[in-house]
Structure formats: structure tokens, C-alpha cells
Image: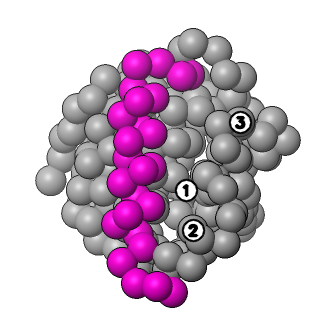
Amino acid sequence: MTDDSSLGMTRRALLGAFAATAVSAAPTFSNAAGFLRGAGDIRRLKMASPRTGEKIDTIYWIEGDYIKDAVREINLFMRDWRTNDVHNIDLRTLDIMAAAHNLMDVNEPYLLLSGYRSPKTNAMLRARSSGVAKNSRHLRGQAADLRLNSRSVSQMYRAAVSCRGGGVGRYSGSNFVHMDCGPVRSWGR
């Protein structure tokens, strides 16, 4: 799962974002204490699916190593809920999601609106909306559409853009942010 395509050029930028989150997320002693307890360098994702009612809270990376079982659990969680098709989610996308979450210093799980999309689901969504890309990164397991109740779309967008790890779309009218591991770019209002 850690082939060159999932650990490409943006890995250094993501590692820098994680280092920055340790500083920005620890402005008080109470927050800093967790970093001082020897917990090591970890990456964690907390998500809930309003579509399936499922929740996940997992550490998927510890001190340089992805945890295969945790990544498999995330892949299952981020499946196409309409077809139940499971696809490997690009590790870079997970890292962008986790780094943005850390930057916002929030404990609330992401609400996952869309992770992997099967070709059938993507075609159906394209027929309903002009805003769905024909070659969406969702089809490759490289994107997620996310929401947080405690943060605005603008706050989430700024956190994800600051990671400089991929594409970030702001969908204020629909109240979600798109994060992907493609080329660094941003769009929306």
C-alpha cells in the first residue's frame, strides 16, 4: 500500500504540515501534555458517516509506518455506500485529511459525505449535477468530501489549503470541503 504513487512528491509538504500542527495545536500546557507523554508521532482519523451511521476513530500511522489493518478499516469505511464497493484510499489523501483536522484543533469527527465512488455512482451523480467531474479523483480513491459541525467551510478550506498537499474545493452552498491528493490547486466560494 505504500507504493511510489501514494508517497509522491507531496510527502515532504505533508510532513511539514504535521510538524506545524504539533506547534499550532499545542498553545497551552493542557494540549502540549499529550505530545510530552511519549506518545510518539501518530496520525489519526476520526470520521462518522451520516449515510451509513458508522463511525471510525483509528490511528493509522505510527512513527513512520502505516498500520495495514487500520488502513483497511478506513478503506472499508470510505467505500461507496451506494454500491458497497471498496477501494484502496490513497494514503496521501488520508494524510491531508488528518493534517487539516489537526490544524483546526478540533476533537469532533469529520462527517464523510463521499469517499470512494464507483463508476456507476459517479455517472449517476454526473447525470444529476454539472459539478461532478467525469474523471473525479473519487473514482481512484484519492478524494473525500467532508464536513464539520463546529467549523465553517471557510475554516476547513483554509486548513486544507495550508497543507499544500493537493486539491481543495470549497462548497459553501452544500456545506462541505473536498480534499484530494492531486495537483495543488483550490476552487470554490
Residue drawn at (38%, 63%) of the image: 23
Mark 3, secondary structure of its residue: strand
Residue 147 can be seen in this image: no
Task: Give SS at disc 1.
Answer: strand
Frontmost of labels 3 and 2 is 2
| Magenta stretch: dominant secondary structure | helix
- In this rendered view, identify the residue nearer to me: 57 or 12: 12
**Residue stretch in magenta:** 6-30
- Residue type at the position of mark 1: Leu
The disc at residue 112 is: 1
Residue 3 pos. (x, y %): 64, 15
Residue 40 screen position, x and y as percent: 66, 56
Say whether disc 3 or disc 2 marks the residue closer to the N-terminus: 2
Mark 3 = which residue? 65
Q: Residues within 10 Å of mark 2 (few under 14, many from 20)?
A: some
Q: Nearer the viewer, residue 100 or 122?
A: 100
Check disc 3: other Cα within 10 Å, few if <14, some if 14-19, many if 20+: few
Relative placement, left or right, of 118 versus 69 is: left
What kind of residue is marked 3? Asp
Mark nearest the camera among 2 and 1 is 2
Mark 1 or 3, nearer chain start? 3
Q: Is residue 174 above or below residue 133?
A: below
- Residue at coordinates 69% horizontally, 63% vertically from top-left? 39
**x%, y% of residue 139?**
54, 25
- Please rate how many residues cluster around mark 1, counting C-alpha atoms within 10 Å: few if below 14, some from 14 to 19, many from 20: many
